[in-house]
Image (cartoon, helix red, strand yellow):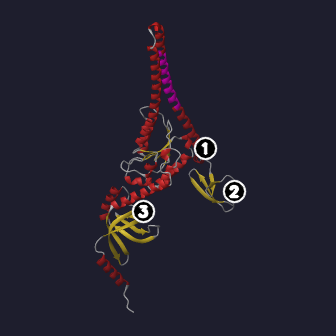
Amino acid sequence: MNSISLSELTAKIQEAIALNFGKPLWIRAEISELRENAGHCYMELVEKSENSDALLAKCRATCWASTFRMLKPYFESTTGQNLTAGLKILVAVTVDFHEIYGLSLNVRDIDPVFTVGEIAARRQQIIRQLEADGIAEMNKQLEIPVPAQRIAVIASASSAGYDDFCNQLTNNQFGYVFYKKLFPAVMQGEATEKSVISALEQIYEQANLFDAVVIIRGGGATTDLAAFDSYNLALNCAQFPLPIISGIGHQRDVSILDTIAHTSVKTPTAAAEFLISTLQSAENQATEIFADIQYFVKNRLENEYRNLDNSQLRIKHALKNKITKRMFVLENQKRRLHSALRMQFVKQQNKLNLLEKNIETYSPAFLLQHGYTITTLNGKKLVSAKNPKKGDKLKTYFADGCVDSTAN
């Protein structure tokens, strides 16, 4: 029986690869894993079935630091996406076979245009799914209440964008009063989708206290936009019972959230300006109606005055005085109306502030901070010592953490 050693076999494989794969090849693949170390990038590339997630092929790939430090910024600046797991890429590779470490690919170049097309296709697929579900226009069909002054804000509490929004809203030139309540959320990275949806759920529980929801984040890398192209996030926003105003700080790109929101603006400051302009439009409309009434009354009285003949001169003077008094009364009514409106705005804000404090006082977090504990069984609050059975796993929450225990 003829035989060869393992090293002889690996040498033949190396020779075959050198003869057949001397030049770089462009391949299409998906990054399933990616890590960086000492400037080098180590990836696992896979190919999956188009009709399922069944794995068709898998291979290790390496982009050495000398190449990676040029390819990474080129790819990310062109696509607006981080080079990360989950992306489909088109890369030029050379094939390498090591007698100990086996087959691997060395990445020499990358085509960002291919990935941009994949991202756009995925975004369009989500939009088509929302349209097929019949919910793509649901939030747009809601009417923004007049006046819209009770605003639920989803943002990062420490972001400059949230500060800009608050300053613009509070220091508006018209002196309008707005009540705003922050529901903090992570606004970039993998946790964004879950965090924003959680904030929406909190707002939903007290939706009657608000007129609209504003989702904002400050400017930053366009790679952060991917978090707002989530189907689940779009699903929650599209079906939300309050109008949603998005201002997520991207000048160039339009996210799926922008597409399904009631109103989309570019920046947090623009979101504040939109709310201010909505209130200003309502005030202008009321002023115009008042001016039309005033003009009609004045015109009617003046017409009556002109129709009087000379024999009724004394009546003319009396009518003129009546017009003057009517005008004076109308002006006083206008001033009182404006004053009453502003007082009503302030009362509403004080009422909402009181409601907010009452909600916080009776919240579980408040009780925990004052020495109480909360015990749960299978994730549900335990209200009686008779409920748990022997061996049941209990979890008790304190202000500074939780403790697991077993029922005896």
**Quadrant (top left, top right, bottom left, bottom right) of the C terminus:** bottom right
What residue do we see at 43% from left, 36% from top? 277
In the figure, residue 209 lies in which quadrant?
Answer: top right
Q: Does residue 121 sit above or below 210 in this rendering?
A: below
Q: Position of residue 292 (x, y in %)?
A: 45, 26
| Magenta-drawn segment | 323-344
Per the image, is 189 magenta? no
Q: Check disc 1 and report the residue beneath it.
A: 362
Q: Check disc 2 and report the residue beneath it.
A: 387
Type of residue at label 2?
Answer: Asn
Q: Position of residue 104 (x, y in %)?
A: 36, 72
**Quadrant (top left, top right, bottom left, bottom right) of the N terminus:** bottom left
Q: Earlier in the sequence, mark 1 or mark 2?
A: 1
Q: Is residue 80 visible?
A: yes
Which numbered marker is on residue 222?
A: none
Mark 1 neighbour density, 10 Å: few (under 14) some (14–19) many (20 or more): few
Q: Check disc 3 and report the residue beneath it.
A: 86
Q: Position of residue 371 (x, y in %)?
A: 61, 47
